Image (cartoon, grey):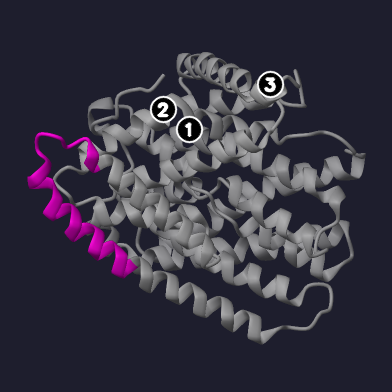
Amino acid sequence: MAEYEYLLDIAIILAATKVLSLFSKRVNLPAVVGSLLAGIILGPVLLNIVQPSETLTNLAELGVIVLMFEAGLETDLNELKKCGLAAFIIALLGVLVPLITGGVIMYIFEKNVMQAIFAGTILTATSVSITVDTLQEMGKLKGKAGTAILGAAIIDDILGIVLLSLITSIGGSGNVDLGSIVFVLIKMALFFVLAGVTGLIAYRFFIWLMPRNEARKRRIPVLAFAYCLVLAYCSEMFGIADITGAYIAGVFLCNLSQSDYIHSKVEVVSYMLITPVFFASIGLKVTVDGMTPEIIILTVVISIAAVLTKIIGCGIGAKVMKYTNREALQIGMGMVCRGEVALIVANKGMKVNLMDAKYFSPMVIMVVVTTLITPILLKFAFYEKNSKKSGAKRPAKA
């Protein structure tokens, strides 16, 4: 029966995330907070009744891909075009400030330059999947700040890949492998060329297909989702996070006349199964093994720094680009979440001996802290006394 335990695990996760999501909404917090807490409660920190498995890991990965595909479908292209330069400046400062701060903090605890730089590299990561879900819930994803967050997150991902490639190519030797760095940059450029060409082809294909499928239009979301998965797979092949490919796929299809219909069908799959598993899986990764007093202090300091450096760095970038104080704060808070991107970077560092294993738990806890606090910060950042001014909201999922 062991091979069927994943069925019970999924059932427990779905029930727990639903109950705690309802509780979160009852206390005026985004539903995603409850889903994240469900993972912590079910995992090794408390009850330890659900173990991370390959099935849950794959479903969680699919969940974040779907979230980013939904975000792409909801993107306002005109707003995205207007914030291109702003997104670059926001992302650049949102990488530099955490990189320097995280490096200094780790060097204080561990007098190792390479390990310190790598710790800073982990802090540069941004995962906006939690932000996307929260902004969708509040009906703010298409706004000026929401669009800037999404644009900056894509550029942040690119800068993070370049930085990660640089630091891992140096490794413990201290020598820069310029050939590896150039190869990575070429692969990235080729991916974006491929994404652009296939995106235009996909868009034209759906324009051609839609009038011919009015009676049986359910095949359109199926084919759109298949395109999303293919582009997500291709992005991983080229060394770029799969969520970037998923988001780009959504952006290319967002102007279709049936984009809302595609989104509504994809959202059902997301809400019913894979998104709750993704949120819970983050909490399941939290452990408290080997937490010495020094490691506990580092965990607290690095978690606080992770929150503040993104708010300050991205906020300054937004102010430089003439955003209002409130919009700058919203953008900074929207970039706080590290999510699965930071975990991937941390895992990579351990494989190439750039990070001691004892520092992995603090990084995981930092990820969970930033993931939990992001929807709460966004709730306050976007709060408006007059609810009529807040715009149309997506129907509550809980």
Q: Residue at x 51, y 68 (%)?
A: 238
- Check disc 1 and report the residue beneath it: 275
1 and 2 marks in contact (CB < 8 Å): yes
Distance between the alpha carbons at the discs numbered 3 and 2: 21 Å
Residue 153, compared with residue 369, is above or below; it is below
How crowded pointer 1 is (Cα within 10 Å; few <14, some 14-19, many 20+) is rated as: many
Distance between the alpha carbons at the discs numbered 1 and 3: 18 Å
Q: Quadrant of residue 180?
A: bottom right
- Check disc 2 and report the residue beneath it: 271
Circle 3 SS class: helix
Q: Residue at x 52, y 13 (%)?
A: 19
Marking on residue 184: none
Circle 1 SS class: helix
Say what amino acid the circle numbered 3 marks.
Answer: Ile
**Which percent across, then down, holds residue 57?**
61, 39
Q: Left or right: 176 with respect to 58?
A: right
Q: Nearer the viewer, residue 325 or 155?
A: 155
Mark 3 vs mark 2: give the one in front. 2
Circle 2 SS class: helix
How crowded pointer 2 is (Cα within 10 Å; few <14, some 14-19, many 20+) is rated as: some
Distance between the alpha carbons at the discs numbered 1 and 2: 6 Å
Q: Left or right: 185 with respect to 134?
A: right
Q: Is residue 217 magenta?
A: yes
Q: Left or right: 215 with respect to 76?
A: left
Is residue 149 visible from the viewing direction of this image? Answer: no
Range shown magenta:
196-220
Say what amino acid the circle numbered 1 marks.
Answer: Thr
**Which percent across, then down, holds residue 96?**
60, 67
Q: Nearer the viewer, residue 369 or 387?
A: 369
**Which percent across, then down, holds residue 313?**
54, 59
- Check disc 3 and report the residue beneath it: 41
Is residue 33 visible from the viewing direction of this image? Answer: yes
